[in-house]
Image (tube, rainbow, N blue to C red):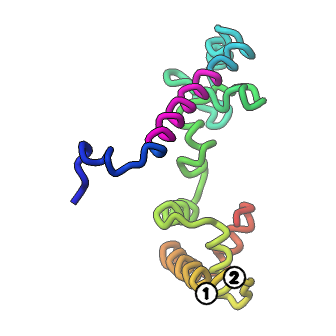
Amino acid sequence: MPIPSRRLPPLLPDSFRVFCLILNALKQWVVAEQSAADRYLLGDKARELCREATDTCVVTGDRISLGVELHHPVRDGRPPIPLSKKGHAVLEGQTPTLGDGAMEQALRALRREEKRSWAHLRRGCLDLVGRPEPWESKASAANARAFARRASEVTNRSYSAILAWLESRGLG
């Protein structure tokens, strides 16, 4: 049964409550400073100019009509790139990349669902084809093998085929 919020404050030490208030203030300060840095580096109209610079997404090749997004603002040292929403999602790994086959789509969905890494899949496949690598623990190795077995079932491909696919894309 959840604790009602009115009874929660007495259960928290004052130092934790102060920490939460300071953390929230720090987050607000960081957001304000990032905006100020963008204005300083780009000027007030720079975002508008970047959005007006092109009407074609460099990732998808589609025309950008509504919903222009700027990928990585200049505050991290790279110039902003105007993209379509679909192009931005592709760059951020939120959708399968363009031209992907059924195997890649299935593996990406499985990886997201199981919250596992490509390296975990690769090491599990290596174990199952008889080329094991040293593991931190037996449990980790067993989880990787289970993940590889599930990937093989979902894609209907052998462990060697999955390994070849991973290597061809530089994953894991």
Q: Residues within 10 Å of mark 1 (few under 14, many from 20)?
A: few
View extreme (right): residue: 77
- What label sits on residue 107 in the rendered view? none
Question: Residue 63: x, y in percent?
Answer: 57, 26
Magenta stretch in the rendered image? 17-34
Q: Is residue 135 magenta?
A: no
Secondary element type, mark 1: helix
Q: Is residue 117 visible?
A: yes
Q: Which residue is mark 1?
A: 138
Query: Which residue shows up at 63% across the image and 80% down it?
Result: 124
Secondary structure state at the residue bearing disc 2: loop
Give yes or no for contact between labels 1 and 2 (Cβ–Cβ under 8 Å). Answer: yes
Side of 58 relative to 156 (left or right):
right
Give the residue displayed 56% in from the left and 52% down from the top: 96
- Residue 29 drawn above or below residue 3: above
> Which residue matches tag 2?
135
Q: Amino acid at mark 1?
A: Lys
Question: What secondary structure is the magenta-colored segment mainly?
Answer: helix
Q: Quadrant of the N terminus?
A: bottom left
Using the numbered discs, state the Cα–Cα distance from disc 1 to disc 2 in whole angstroms: 7 Å
Q: Is residue 2 left or right of residue 120?
A: left
User: Residue 82 appears in which quarter of the rendering?
Assistant: top right
Looking at the picture, does residue 168 appear above or below residue 93?
A: below
Q: Vertically, is 45 above or below 70?
A: above
Residue 99, image x and y in percent?
60, 51
